[in-house]
Amino acid sequence: MRAALACVVGAIVLLGAAGPAAPPAYPTAFITVDELKALVDGGATVAIIDVRTRSEFDELHISNARSIPLRSLPERSREISKAQPVVLY
């Protein structure tokens, strides 16, 4: 019992001392739907990634968007170009 209590207290101390997560090392911005539409209508080349499930994507999606469900994003991240802005929705 004492050993279990010591482990729990030790875990609480270690987790409590951990600092907040660092911000991403890459530029991050949030845009509205209207801002995205203005970019696309203006001819900007933007990679639009739909992170919803495949069935949701099949039901309705933004024109020229690619389906990469959120759960598979880490494994498929190499498929996303770094040469242009990327919009995830």
Image (spheres, grey):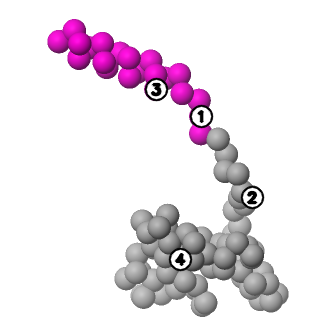
- Name the residue tied to disc 3: 15
Whichever of callouts 1 and 2 sits on the residue coming sooner in the sequence is: 1
Mark 2 and mark 3: span between their CA atoms?
28 Å
Q: Secondary structure at mark 2?
A: loop
Mark 4 and mark 3: span between their CA atoms?
34 Å
Specify the segment rendered in magenta.
1-21
Q: Is residue 14 left or right of residue 83?
A: left
Q: Is residue 1 left or right of residue 77?
A: left
Q: Is residue 20 left or right of residue 73?
A: right
Q: Label 3 sits on what residue type? A: Leu
Whichever of callouts 4 and 1 sits on the residue coming sooner in the sequence is: 1
Q: Are marks 4 and 3 in contact (CB under 8 Å)?
A: no
Q: Nearer the viewer, mark 2 or mark 4?
A: 2
Query: Which label sits on residue 20?
Result: 1
Crowding around mark 3 (Cα neighbors within 10 Å: few <14, some 14 to 19, many 20+) is: few
Q: Label 1 sits on what residue type? A: Pro
- Name the residue tied to disc 4: 50
Crowding around mark 2 (Cα neighbors within 10 Å: few <14, some 14 to 19, many 20+) is: few
Crowding around mark 4 (Cα neighbors within 10 Å: few <14, some 14 to 19, many 20+) is: many
Q: Secondary structure at mark 3?
A: helix
Q: Secondary structure at mark 1?
A: loop
Mark 2 and mark 4: span between their CA atoms?
19 Å
Residue depicted at x 71% and y 80%: 46
Q: Residue furthest front?
A: 78
Q: Label 2 sits on what residue type? A: Pro
- Name the residue tied to disc 2: 27
